[in-house]
Image (cartoon, rainbow, N blue to C red):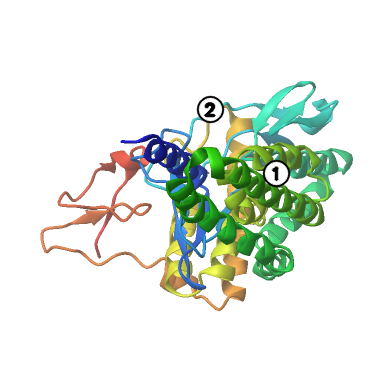
């Protein structure tokens, strides 16, 4: 393998690494493939660990987008906050969580440091991103300032906003006013980097063509970085901290600049619940399948559903999960779905099957027992 081939291989590996998207457990990615088709992606169990897994974005034109969405990483009640959630939406299981329980009056200070939400100067919970950490900290400060009787309504309002599919689509429309130019510039840079530049080096040699190729790369990466800075400021006005690092990286690394449009969109709808993103971008069967999974997970969570048997902690988790379930059911009914049809028990896949898990739909030949994959949840008999 010659020097040109080796250099091209290294650049290709770096570019493929830029196409890798880390998706946390229980989060959902909406991936745009060829054309305008979207599909839902859950973190798998192969290229990942207990905290999440890699989902690959489309590396070839039209450089499809990956949108991330997350459920809240906490449980909230009118009395207290808990840095634990029983949500478990993918096969990799519930991610490890450090459970901290605190009453609102005991939270003297609430702030952020990167993606961490700090309460009284110590890490309360790690959010998926700095932007979500700021939103969560703002919600906790709002709840702290309210009376206990008003907190329940405020929590419901926050959940209803997370489940607003129209608002998620509006965010996409805002991106469409900023992102297409970056995508086309990325296409041009992709062709320049992987086709035109190797061809020039092949015919003229690196000594003659190298300087001009470098000038062309710098001009393109600077242009893309400048447009990215402006578009990011328009879409994420409070995200100055998350803007500088990718901007600087784009100036120095053309593979990163190629994915500028994807980087700009990735956090676009992360503040919305996965159900809202599925309704907005993947209506029809994918939305219904996710809706069933979400409802069953809320009604029959993987055990243990709370990090401790302490009554106050169990009450906080159960209250919040019940409110989330109620708001999800309202959102699904507004979307025209029938809850009874979504949660119907599965039909036996074989005559010998006698029971099933009400959470994951796994089927068993025994009449009674538990589902180990769901933490020992009791099986339900087929009628």
Residue 182: where, in percent of width, then height? Answer: 67, 60
| Labels 2 and 1: the sequence-earlier one | 1
Observer-nearest residue: 321 or 252? 252
Looking at the picture, does residue 345 appear above or below residue 206? Answer: below
Q: Which residue is mark 1?
A: 132
The quarter holding residue 234 reads bottom right
Image position of 193 (left or right of 72): left
Pick the residue in front: 103 or 221.
221
Q: Residue at coordinates 64% horizontally, 39% vertically from top-left?
A: 74
Residue 72 in view (yes/no): no
Q: Quadrant of the N terminus?
A: top left
The x and y percentages for residue 309 are: 52, 28
Q: Residue 261's quadrant in the figure?
A: bottom right
- Say which mark, if any, is on residue 261: none
The relative height of residue 249 versus residue 309 in the rendered view (above or below) is below
Q: Is residue 113 visible?
A: yes
Measured along the vertical axis of the image, is residue 226 above or below residue 14? Answer: below
Q: Are marks 2 and 1 in contact (CB under 8 Å)?
A: no
**Residue 308: numbered disc:** 2
Q: Quadrant of the C terminus?
A: bottom left
Residue depicted at x 22% and y 47%: 368
Q: Camera-side residue: 27 or 242?
A: 242
Regarding mark 1 in the picture, which secondary structure is present there? helix
Q: Secondary structure at mark 2?
A: loop
């Amino acid at each position: 393998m010659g020097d040109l081939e080796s250099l091209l291989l290294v650049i290709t590996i770096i570019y493929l690494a830029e196409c890798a998207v880390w998706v946390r457990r229980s989060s959902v990615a909406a991936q745009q493939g060829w054309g305008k088709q979207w599909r839902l992606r859950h973190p798998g169990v192969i290229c990942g660990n207990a905290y999440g897994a890699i989902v690959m974005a489309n590396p070839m034109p039209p450089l499809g987008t990956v949108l991330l969405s997350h459920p809240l990483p906490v449980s909230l009640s009118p009395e207290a906050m808990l840095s634990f959630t029983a949500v478990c939406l993918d096969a990799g299981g519930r991610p490890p969580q450090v459970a901290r329980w605190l009453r609102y009056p005991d939270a003297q200070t609430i702030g952020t440091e990167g993606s961490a939400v700090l309460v009284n100067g110590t890490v309360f919970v790690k959010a998926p991103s700095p932007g979500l950490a700021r939103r969560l900290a703002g919600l906790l400060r709002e709840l702290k300032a309210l009376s206990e009787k008003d907190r329940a309504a405020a929590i419901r309002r926050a959940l209803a906003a997370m489940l607003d599919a129209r608002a998620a689509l509006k965010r996409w429309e805002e991106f469409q006013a900023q992102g297409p130019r970056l995508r086309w510039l990325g296409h041009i840079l992709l062709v320049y980097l992987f086709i035109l530049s190797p061809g020039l080096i092949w015919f003229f040699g690196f000594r003659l063509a190298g300087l001009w190729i470098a000038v062309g790369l710098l001009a393109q990466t600077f242009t893309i970085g400048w447009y990215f800075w402006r578009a990011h400021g328009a879409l994420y006005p409070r995200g100055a901290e998350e803007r500088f690092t990718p901007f600087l990286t784009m100036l120095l690394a053309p593979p990163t600049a190629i994915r500028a449009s994807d980087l700009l969109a990735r956090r676009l709808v992360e503040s919305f619940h996965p159900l809202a993103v599925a309704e907005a971008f993947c209506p029809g069967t994918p939305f219904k399948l996710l809706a069933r999974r979400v409802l069953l997970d809320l009604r029959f969570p993987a055990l243990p559903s709370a990090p401790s048997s302490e009554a106050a902690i169990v009450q906080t988790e159960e209250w919040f999960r019940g409110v989330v379930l109620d708001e999800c059911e309202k959102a699904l009914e507004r979307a025209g779905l029938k809850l009874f049809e979504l949660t119907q028990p599965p039909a036996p896949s074989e005559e010998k099957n006698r029971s099933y898990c009400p959470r994951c739909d796994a089927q068993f030949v025994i009449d009674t027992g538990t589902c180990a994959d769901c933490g020992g949840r009791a099986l339900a008999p087929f009628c």
